[in-house]
Structures are given as C-alpha cells and as structure tokens.
Amino acid sequence: MKKILTLFTIAALSTFSLIAQNTSTKKADKHFKRFEFVEAAKDYAKLVENGKGDPYVYSQLAESYYNVFNTQEAERWYAKAIEGSDSPEMIFKYSQMLKANGKYEASNAQMAKFAKMRPSDDRAIAYSKNPDYLPKILEKGKKFNIQNLGFNTKFSDFGGTLKGGKLYITSARNTSRKTYGWTEEPFLDIYELAKSEDGTYQAAALVEDKVNTKYHEGLVSFSPDGNTMYFSRESFFEKEYEKDSISKYKYSLLHLFKAKKSDGKWDNVEGFAVNSKNYSVKNPSVSSDGKTLYFASDMPGGYGLFDIYKASINSDGSLGEPVNLGQKVNTQSQEMFPYISSNNTLYFSSNGHLGLGNLDVFYTKEIDGKMAPIRNVGIPINSSGDDFAFSLNEETEEGYVSSNRDGGLGGDDIYAIKKLQPLCDVLITGTVTDDKTGKPLNAASVSLYDDLGNLVLSKVTNSDGTVEFIVECDKASALQVVLDGYESRVVTIAASQEEEVQVSIALNPIEEIVGPEQINLDPIYFDFDKSNVTAQAAFELDKLIQIMNKYPDLVINATSHTDSRGSAPYNEKLSDRRAKTTVQYVISKGIDKSRISGMGKGENELKVNCGSNCTDEEHQLNRRSEFIIVSGGPQAQ
C-alpha cells in the first residue's frame, strides 16, 4: 500500500529535517520530491557507499523505503537515523517497521520511548494505557476466513464494492497508461468484474464512459439505487495542484466526484463543493439509507494527517457541512478508508490506533451520538502489512479487504472474506471474594448465562479469585457463583460495547442466611397456578441444602403460600402441592425426609394484603415459600 499512499493514504514528503539538504543530496532529493522513491533510495544509498551518510541521508533513505513498504530496509535505516535524531515521529515510524517485521518487543520499546517523548499524543496515551495490546489482539482468535482472489495481478489491485452483480475495484493493471514515478506502475483506474451465481468472477473490464482519466482514480461507493457513483480522482484533471517554487514540480491533491448512470452509462461527472486546492478528499462510503457520505480528508481543523468525516447528502445531491468524527476515531496519524455498513458499524483503516502492522482495520459504532470504543478487527483481516479498503455485507457476512501482506500476487491484492463468528465481543472478568475478609476465593464455580437464561459455560476461579468469559456486544448476561460454605449469588451484567467489563462478586459465608427462627432465603417464587420447582427456586433451595448438610441436626418446616386469586379451597390445595414439591426437591438432594416437612397455607397469610387491586408483582410476592427452623442448627450448638 505504501506505493500509492501519496494519493490514497498519506502525505509523502519527509517530516524530518535533521540536517539541511546540500549539493551532494540534490539529485536524490529531487527524486524524493517527485515521489520517485525507488530512484531516490538508490541515490541515497550511493551517498552512504561513498561515505557521505549522515542522519539526514539515513532518514531520507528510511523514508524512501517506508513509502514503498520495504520494511526490512526501512527498519535498518531508521535504526541508523535515530542514532543522531530525537524526532518522535521517526521513532514512531521505526516502531511501526519493527512491528511489521514481527519484532514486537523491540517495537514496544520504541513505542515506550515515543510515549515518554510525547505523553499527550493520542497514540502515546493509547499505548500507555494498554502496553500489552498485541497478545490481546492475537488471542481474540480468527473471526474471518480470508482468500486471495484469482483476478489479482502483479500490479496494485485494491478495493471491492459489490453493486448490481458487479464488483468494482481500483487497479494499476492498465499498461496503456503512463507509468507513475513512485510505483513505476501505470496510473490507477476503476474496473468492474461481473460476479456469477457460483461466486466466480468474469474478466475485469475498464469502466468506460467518463469515469476514468489518464490520472489516478480511487475507490468507489454507490447510492442505494445504484444510479450514483462516488469516487476520488487526482486533481490534475481539474488543473488544480501545488507547485514547488524551487523544483517547479507539481503536487496533485485528491478530489471527490460523483457520476450519474444514464442509459446504462456513467455520465454527468461532477465535483463537490467540499473539494479544495488546499487539501484532499477521498475514500467515499455511502450509508445504506443514502443520506450520509463518509470520507477521509486532510482538511484544516483535523486531528492528524488524514481524518474521517461525514456529511449529509442533500436532496439536490450536494453535500452538507463536513463533520469530523472526533478524537475517539481520529488520531494524530492517519485514519482512512471508511466503510459504513448496513447496521451502521463504521470500519476504517488506521496507523494511529494500536494494531498488528502499519495500517490495520478497526471498527466502531455511533450510539446515542457517541462513538463506541475503537476495536481492532484482529487476525486474519489484519497482518503485519497494510490492511485497508475493508467492506462487509452484514446480511451475507461476506466482503473484501485489501492488503500488501506477504504471499500476494502484486503490491496490493484483494481478498474475499467470510465472517465466522460475531466480531464485537466483551471480555468479562469476574473476581470472587469473601465479603467479610475481602480475600479472593479459589475454586468457586462460576456459570455464564445468556440474555435468554440459557447456560453458556461454567468455569472455576483461579487462586486470584478471577475467571474470564467472552460474550457478544450488546447482549446482557448473568454470572451465577456457587462455592461450598458460601451463599450463592447471581449477578446480572448489562449489555455493553466496552472491550472489558470488571465484575466484583462478594460472597457471604453461608451462616449469614440463618436467622433465629428461619432460614432467610430469597423468596421462592412460583409461576401462576403452578407448583413445579423453577430454576430460580432450585438456586435458592440449594442454599438451604448447604445449611442442612453443614448442620445435620437442623430440622425445617417449609410453608407455601398462594396469592388471593382463585377460591380459598383451591388455593389451599395449590399451596399444599407447592410445599410437597419443595420438600421433594430437598429430599432429592440427599436430605433425610425426617428433617423436612411441608405445609400449605393457601391465601391465609398474605404478605401484601392488596384485595382485588393487586399488581402482578404483588401477586408474585404472595406466592412464596418460607423455611421455619423447628430444631437444631447453629442456635442449638
């Protein structure tokens, strides 16, 4: 991806001015300013060979290799350059190259140095909060299948927008075009490939009509009806550019355009008012309702080199005022390639958020006007290289991502992806302690229940009293904790978009539920007109069983009560069935039948005397069981 970053990702010129340029670097500097990084690297390397290497030459050599994604050489020369430099940005890029080469510990050491030099930088803050982020990303596991597509070429191919049975990509395969100096590949064009029902693709065809020019064109997005195409194009087409006063070299920008389909052809190409001769606008993505356009820009007022913005699409096709997505999304580096999915999840690429390589794919979602935490999509979507132009059909769970990772056919390749499991998850860390001493409790059984009350998984706490579960975002759950000698507890966990949720669960010693006259369980509720023991009732009765096992001389009388609905004789019979069912459950768990008896009270002892105006909640309070101590227990000892 580095090969086309001047147009579709980053500003190309070096930000490092360690030593002023001189006569010996003039030729190399000229190539560098013209984005001819291959030739620039050769010339800077010759200077080193001739003994004219210095921090400036080393940094320019590193930058040249960085911009063509030669990570090994970039790492080598950044290492030399920082010996004579204290540039935080150089150290940040050096850490990126180390990471791209799989040297994670060395990369973290440089990030720690960068964070110390720029403690208020968003990238430094993120790293300082989570220095062990790499294992966490890798341990999330494989959420997608990924496959290199057969239509990739030896040239740069990227993108992947499926519309009307056709896949639209951007490619440098058009050898009839002029060669671009940076990449020594042809200028980029937009292509379309018909996708067959069996999932295969027909040969790529150049999008004709008025979309492609002799200059670069970028990624595309469509209105919901497919009749408007949004795309980026190099500003040379509009004869807008910046000109270096010394070298006279012209620097292009990127502008945003739309084209209308007329009689099956793309026509009426128009630029937007947001375009400027002072900054670039690129990477369009249209929301599923067609009302909002997301894009990347380096316009003034942003947080970094490129930020992600959104703008309303007005009824006349014009764009509203651009809105920066804010500092949670945008960093002091680069955020680009936004893709807004049908469920309003925003995917984008960044080299400012914590990732595995240089550009990683991240996602977030706007909830009640605020952005949810930024999350790394993880492997295998992300690699040690550049991963970008992600798109996903949330219904079919299929899509595309582009990457310059090892093993591809060209500089950038397009990969088909298939989602295997929910992408957004939450790590729940439960810590179980003794409520009296505060000490962690080992070997407590902790069961995870989903939002429908289904048992998902059970684990036991470690010596630190902790246990971990991963649940899906936006789904409520519950933890049930059981440990012999302690009162069992259930803790509900609200639906969340946070990456991690900490839950503290303090257990009372089981003796705490023993009162002077009865066992103080939470109410044993029965469903209306039912006498069977429910899961909730069993959970409470298990506490009674714990107490009766601890005190073998304890004798209990279980009384059962109904609400006031129904006739008194019927309620008396119903309560008697409930009392007997309760007794049978306790006996089934190994308690001798001589130690527990049951009695139905009907509606004779209502807890809430609400007459004929009872609410459902009041009726349920009246449907209960109580456990009276007949003899034995701790009071008798």
Image (spheres, helix red, strand yellow):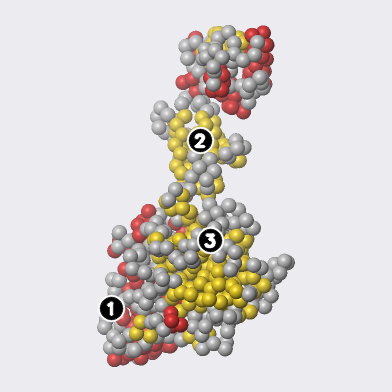
Residue at 65 percent of width and 16 percent of height: 578
Does 417 appear above or below 29? above
Q: Pinpoint residue 374: horizontal percent, then vertical percent.
A: 45, 56
* Chain-order first, disc 3 or disc 2: 3
Q: In this view, does 227 lie above or below 354?
A: below
User: What residue would you read off at disc 3?
Assistant: 290
- Element class at badge 3: loop
Q: What residue sits right under mark 1 in the picture? A: 18
Callout 2: few (<14), some (14-19), or many (20+) C-alpha neighbours within 10 Å? some
Rendering coords of residue 63 (x, y %): 39, 78
Residue 327 seen anywhere in this rendered image of the structure: yes
Which of the two marks, 1 or 2, is nearer to us in this view?
A: 2
Mark found first going from the N terminus, 1 or 2? 1
Using the image as rendered, state which of residue 176 and residue 262 is in the foreground.
262
Relative to 66, is 343 on the left or the right? Answer: right
Location of mark 2 (residue): 492
Looking at the rendered structure, the kind of residue marked 2 is Thr
